[in-house]
Image (spheres, rainbow, N blue to C red):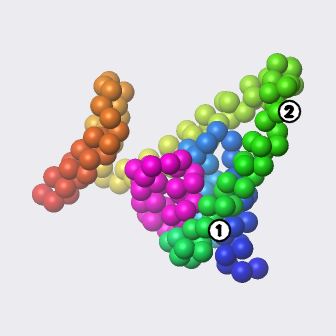
Amino acid sequence: MTELFKLFITFLKIGSFSFGGGYAMLPLIEEEIVYINQWLTQSEFIDIIAISQMSPGPIAINSATFVGFKYLGVGGAIAATVGVCFTSFFLVTGLARVIIKYYDSLIVKGIFSGIRPGVIGLIGAACVSLFKASIVDIKSLIIGLTVLVILSKTKIHPIAVILSSGVMGILLYSI
């Protein structure tokens, strides 16, 4: 199996077995990319997640594109992006009518009632993993807690928070 095909299959698996959007995919992406295939280090993965969050578009697609590019260049970016989108594209186009038709059925309601809390658990696991990798000292803890408080108490735009975090990083880590 070529590395390009392996990258496609890895992101096909990630896209096929992740529900709840990009944040819910992060634990699976991390497991596959950092631990199983060792295509990136934990630090590189965290940097790619940060870039993916700042870039326009869904975090799962951005992450796949950046990981693919970092690992295998433009071909890797295309393979990873197509892989992560492949299953959801066919599910949405193929199953949308069925889900809409039977949305009020007890089985479909039961499925979604089970998936929702599972997705929250996946997002929580991603938060814990990102916290462990990103909060490495008291300065990073100060930046993280400051951003958490600001975002939970105000309606400041996330771009302003990202830029402010960069400024805090310069101030705290240059001194």
Q: Circle 1: is it few (<14), some (14-19), or many (20+) Cα within 10 Å?
A: many
The residues bearing labels 1 and 2 have C-alpha atoms spaced at a distance of 29 Å
Task: Give amino acid for label 2.
Answer: Val
Q: Which residue is mark 2?
A: 98
Can you give x and y, in whole percent of width and height, for residue 31 in the image? Answer: 62, 59
Q: Which residue is mark 1?
A: 79
Q: Which residue does the image show at 69% across and 67% down from the upper left?
A: 8
Q: Circle 2: is it few (<14), some (14-19), or many (20+) Cα within 10 Å?
A: few
Q: Which residues are magenta?
A: 38-67
Label 2 secondary element: helix
Q: Which mark is residue 142?
A: none
Q: Which residue does the image show at 34% across and 31% down from the upper left?
A: 151
Q: Was residue 39 drawn as part of the magenta stretch in this picture?
A: yes
Q: Is residue 7 left or right of residue 47?
A: right
Task: Give amino acid for label 1.
Answer: Ala
Can you give x and y, in whole percent of width and height, for residue 140 in the image? Answer: 30, 49
Can you give x and y, in whole percent of width and height, for residue 16 in the image? Answer: 74, 51
Q: Which residue does the image show at 42% across and 56% down from the upper left?
A: 51
Can you give x and y, in whole percent of width and height, for residue 174 in the image? Answer: 16, 60
Is 114 or 65 nearer to us in this picture?
65
Seen in the picture, residue 168 relative to 147 is either above or below; the reply is: below
Q: Is residue 158 left or right of residue 88?
A: left
Q: Furthest residue to the bottom?
A: 2
Which quadrant does the C terminus fall into? bottom left
Q: Which residue does the image show at 65% across and 68% down from the upper left?
A: 79
Which quadrant does the N terminus fall into? bottom right
Is 72 or 24 nearer to us in this picture?
72
